[in-house]
Image (cartoon, rainbow, N blue to C red):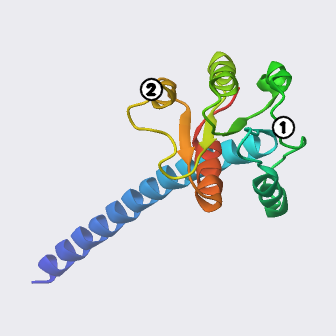
């Protein structure tokens, strides 16, 4: 009888140690994934964000909102001067106010695509037609996303900057 008690105690001890080791391994995997994501976010938050206006939409409010959050670097005021796109590689993200002015929109998307810079198109709900040329251009660039409100814009910025390693 005493031998059975010792066997059950040894078996329970083995189960306890195996469970602790498994838990430790899972915790290390989860923490390493989290740390990798946070390092990417911190590195990307140090880089500036470029904002391009459109003729119909001024992005001063959104730029101020992002600056006031204390997380994002917005060194330049929003403008619709396409010469700013010549220096897009030093930015981690392009926020582009949508308008049907295809010259600005097409040039900005093309510059971002050439430099592999993620783009968030800031448009009013329903403004971009689902079967239009502009939507095809957006869908054709894998680092493009659409935001319709300031909260969605901030959400997308954090999402992109935390997972995409910007070179």
Residue that mark 2 sits on: 136
Residue that mark 1 sits on: 79
Counting residues from the start of the chain, the first of labels 1 and 2 encountered is 1
Residue at 40%, 61% (x, y): give it: 23
**Label 2: element kind:** helix
Looking at the picture, how far across and down is residue 63, in whole percent?
80, 52
152 or 9, which lies in front?
152
Looking at the picture, how far across and down is residue 116, in whole percent?
64, 22
Residue at 83%, 42% (x, y): give it: 78
Residue at 74%, 38% (x, y): give it: 55
71 or 60, which lies in front?
60
Residue occupying the far top of the picture:
114
Q: Quadrant location of the N terminus?
A: bottom left
89 or 112, which lies in front?
112
Q: Is residue 40 left or right of residue 9?
A: right
Q: Is residue 19 above or below residue 2?
A: above
């Amino acid at each position: 009888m005493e031998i059975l008690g010792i066997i059950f105690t040894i078996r329970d001890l083995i189960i306890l140690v195996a469970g602790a080791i498994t838990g430790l391994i899972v915790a290390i995997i989860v923490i390493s994934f989290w740390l990798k994501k946070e390092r990417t976010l911190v590195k990307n938050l140090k880089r500036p964000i470029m904002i391009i206006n459109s003729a119909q939409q001024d992005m001063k409010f959104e730029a101020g909102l992002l600056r006031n959050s204390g997380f994002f670097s917005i060194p330049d005021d929003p403008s619709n001067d396409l010469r700013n796109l010549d220096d897009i590689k030093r930015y981690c993200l392009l926020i582009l106010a949508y308008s049907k002015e295809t010259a600005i929109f097409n040039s900005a998307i093309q510059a971002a695509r050439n430099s592999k810079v993620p783009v968030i198109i800031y448009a009013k709900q329903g403004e971009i037609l689902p079967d239009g040329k502009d939507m095809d251009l957006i869908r054709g660039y894998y680092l493009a996303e659409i935001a319709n409100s300031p909260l969605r814009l901030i959400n997308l910025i954090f999402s992109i900057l935390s997972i995409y390693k910007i070179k």
